[in-house]
Image: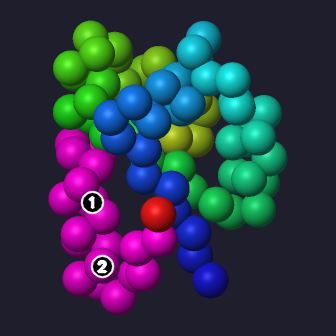
Amino acid sequence: VQILVVAYGPGVRHLLRGESQVAERVASLQAYDIEFVACGTTLDTLGVAPEEALDGVQVVQNGLPEIVERQLMGWVHLR
């Protein structure tokens, strides 16, 4: 089983250095091979550089198309 968390909109702040109140939790989940992805469009809107994402967080161009593309590859979308 592969698990990927895609953060966009207000949720992306949980994956940013200096803003995340759950950074330790994110790191502990990454140790179990859970992946985290941040929406680049949201970061642009907030005026935040992709380098501000927590270690190990991948930044994609846009979060919602990432979800759709994963669904087309057979992934299941849970909210």
Identify the residue at horizontal 52%, vertical 50% (top origin).
Answer: 36
* Residue 5 seen in this snapshot: yes
Instruction: Point out which mark residue 71 bears.
Output: 2
| Quarter occupied by residue 71 | bottom left
Badge 1 crowding class, 10 Å Cα cut-off, few under 14, some 14 to 19, many 20 or more, is some
Identify the residue at horizontal 35%, vertical 88% (top origin).
Answer: 74
- Above or below residue 11? Residue 65 is below
Q: Is 34 placed left or right of 40 in the picture?
A: right
Identify the residue at horizontal 22%, vertical 45% (top origin).
Answer: 62
> Residue 14: where, in percent of width, then height?
55, 30
Residue at disc 2, secondary structure:
helix
Residue designated by label 1: 66
Q: Quick one: 21 or 66, which is closer to the camera? A: 21
Identify the amino acid type marked 2. Answer: Gln
> Residue 32: where, in percent of width, then height?
76, 62
Residue 28 included in the magenta stretch of the image: no
> Residue 55: where, in percent of width, then height?
60, 32
Q: Is 14 placed left or right of 34 in the picture?
A: left
Residue 71 included in the magenta stretch of the image: yes
Q: Which residues are magenta?
A: 59-78
Q: Is 35 placed left or right of 49 in the picture?
A: right
Q: Earlier in the sequence, mark 2 or mark 1?
A: 1
- Above or below residue 60? Residue 13 is above
Q: Is 56 placed left or right of 53 in the picture?
A: right
* Residue 53 seen in this snapshot: no
Instruction: Point out which mark residue 19 bears.
Output: none
